[in-house]
């Protein structure tokens, strides 16, 4: 994995240099964007609702027992916004979209489609990598926002419906408003933005360096997902440390 | 980066000098030398595995040689910018169509991606080129819905759209029935006559080779064993060439 980091940084750099060409590729960006939303929105809903819910369920009774009713909403809201939504969405997108990127680009490599692009003077980074990276860099932060909102709702519903917690939805959101600042949400969205580049660069890179036949494609897909997740978790720590005041 | 359309429709010359290439200690090209003149139809024949496809991949710049060099119109293709200066096309042995794109998008991709023509005109050109290769009205099909020979013809249409100055065909007729093969041979010939494109054709097809070639090279185990006009090659006494040209199935 690590001998490839240099190549990945280079790919990232080439993509950044190509950003001015994005307007020409806008149709492909929209296609990818639509693809990402279409593939993940329902999953994001279910996942976020239940994570928010289970968070309330795990922490609620203990807090209430100690008379800390006012902190349940804050705790759920805070954890969801700063940590759980970005990391969950990133891992979900690595599995759902990163794998698809590596598979598609990998099969294009194996079946000489990328060679054909090169003979036609079409730069594979501009044609394949740029639209995917731009789309994911927009989509993932938006999914994070969406996930945060659904997670909060899940927490509120569970908190009000569970007899051991028994906090009204209104009280839940009031306590959340006191604890969670806009800055915390921005923090999570920013993490999502960074993770998006990781998933995109790692997956596209794996696709481009695919060797061999169908088995090579399978190997690339696995590597894309596993390496993305490892890097996401490591960067999550680093980013949290940096953003800590 | 973008190639611009030019009115210069004359073919380019190709010169291969001392080309060597090994894959994992197996020497595939053992010092090839050949010169293809502008506007020539040059056919490369040779047994399977002799390195013909590898040679084409070097000429179009997909592979870098271990030694030797390739010159297009006298300029090394390693020199930055040279590859972008000339319009070149390659018809891959496998076709190498874009499997996620329709036939129409495949054929038009060069014009679309380089923004060379407005969309309506691209549609018209695509329809015209598909008709040329006998696939009228297949624009909206996906490559997976085509037969092997049809894919090959789409790949040829895709190369024709580029209006290249150098075109490399890797076994253009290998999967075609005799009638389609003749149609493709005529098209290769016609394209060469019309825009003077230099054409390098790799083929096992003896009829195609002797029918359209200005000159022929025979390559065997990474070396050129004969080069010359079709008649000269036919008269060669080299045993591999004699076998190659006269191989016939004879029931015992
Ligand atoms: N990427 C590669 N890695 C390793 N070996 C390769 C590679 N490409 C080609 N070869 C080897 O080079 C030799 C020549 O291959 P090439 O594809 O040029 O043959 P060919 O003359 O085109 O044959 P055919 O007529 O069957 O297409 C073969 O022995 C092949 O195994
Ligand atoms: Mg071959």
Image (cartoon, grey):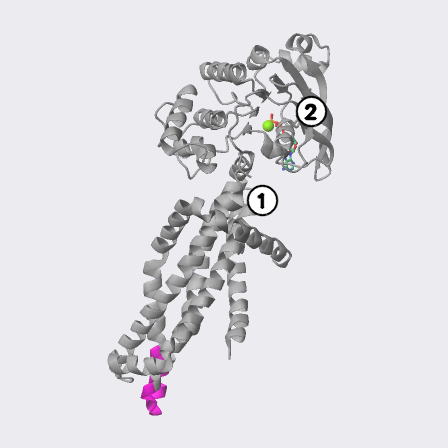
**In the displayed structure, would residue A61 be above or below residue A196?**
below
The quadrant where residue A95 appears: bottom left
Q: Magenta stretch?
A: A56-70
* Quadrant of the rendered image containing residue B21: top right
> What residue is drawn where x is 36% and y is 69%?
A148
Q: Which residue is mark 2?
A: B15
Residue A222 visible in the picture: no
How far, Cα to Cα, is label 2 from label 1?
Answer: 31 Å
Residue indicated by mark 1: A211
Which quadrant is home to the C terminus of chain B?
A: top right
- Image quadrant where residue B192 sits: top right
Residue B189 at x, y percent in the picture: 53, 14
Nearer the observer, A110 or A28: A28
Front position among marks 2 and 1: 2
Please give the chain letter of the residue carrying mark 1. A
Q: Look at the magenta stretch and give its main secondary structure.
A: helix
Residue drawn where x is 46% and y is 51% of the image = A132
Q: Nearer the viewer, residue A212 or B78?
A: B78
Label 2: few (<14), some (14–19) or many (≥20) C-alpha neighbours in 10 Å: many
Residue B74 image position (x, y, % from top left): 69, 26
Instruction: Give the answer, above or below, for where B175 lies relative to A89.
Output: above
């Amino acid at each position: 994995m690590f001998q490839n980091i240099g190549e990945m940084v280079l790919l990232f750099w080439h993509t950044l240099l190509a950003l001015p060409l994005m307007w020409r590729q806008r149709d492909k960006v929209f296609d990818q964007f639509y693809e990402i939303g279409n593939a993940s929105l329902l999953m994001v809903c279910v996942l976020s609702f239940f994570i928010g819910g289970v968070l309330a369920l795990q922490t609620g009774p203990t807090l209430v027992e100690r008379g800390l009713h006012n902190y349940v909403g804050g705790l759920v809201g805070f954890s969801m916004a700063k940590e759980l939504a970005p990391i969950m969405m990133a891992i979900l997108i690595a599995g759902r979209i990163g794998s698809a990127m590596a598979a598609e680009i990998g099969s294009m490599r194996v079946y000489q489609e990328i060679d054909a692009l090169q003979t036609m003077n079409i730069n594979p980074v501009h044609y394949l990598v740029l639209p995917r990276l731009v789309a994911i860099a927009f989509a993932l932060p938006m999914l994070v926002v969406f996930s945060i909102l659904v997670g909060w709702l899940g927490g509120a519903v569970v908190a009000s419906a569970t007899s051991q917690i028994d906090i009204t939805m209104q009280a839940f959101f009031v306590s959340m408003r006191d604890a969670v600042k806009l800055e915390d949400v921005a923090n999570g969205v920013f993490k999502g933005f960074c993770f998006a580049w990781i998933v995109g660069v790692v997956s596209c890179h794996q696709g481009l360096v695919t060797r061999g036949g169908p088995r090579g494609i399978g190997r690339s897909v696995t590597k894309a997902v596993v390496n993305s997740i490892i890097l996401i978790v490591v960067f999550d720590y680093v980013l949290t440390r940096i953003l800590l005041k | 980066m973008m190639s611009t359309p030019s009115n210069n429709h004359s073919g380019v010359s190709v010169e291969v000098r001392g080309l060597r290439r090994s894959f994992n200690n197996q020497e595939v090209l053992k010092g090839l030398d050949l010169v293809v003149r502008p506007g020539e139809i040059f056919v490369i024949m040779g047994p399977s595995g002799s390195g013909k496809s590898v040679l084409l991949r070097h000429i179009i710049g997909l592979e870098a040689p271990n030694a030797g060099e390739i010159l297009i119109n006298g300029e090394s293709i390693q020199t930055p910018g040279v590859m972008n200066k000339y319009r070149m096309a390659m018809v891959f042995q496998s076709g190498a169509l874009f499997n996620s794109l329709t036939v129409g998008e495949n054929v038009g991709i060069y014009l679309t991606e380089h923004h060379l023509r407005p969309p309506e005109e691209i549609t018209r050109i695509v329809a015209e080129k598909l008709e040329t290769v006998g696939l009228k009205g297949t624009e909206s099909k996906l490559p997976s819905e085509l037969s092997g020979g049809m894919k090959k013809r789409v790949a040829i249409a895709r190369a024709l759209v580029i209006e290249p100055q150098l075109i490399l065909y890797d076994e253009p007729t290998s999967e075609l029935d005799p009638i389609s093969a003749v149609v493709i041979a005529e098209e290769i010939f016609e394209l060469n006559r019309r825009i003077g494109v230099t054409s390098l054709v790799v083929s096992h097809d003896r009829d195609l080779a002797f029918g359209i070639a200005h000159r022929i090279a025979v390559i065997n185990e990474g070396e050129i064993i004969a080069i010359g006009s079709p008649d000269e090659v036919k008269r060669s006494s080299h045993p591999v060439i004699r076998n190659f040209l006269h191989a016939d199935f004879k029931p015992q």
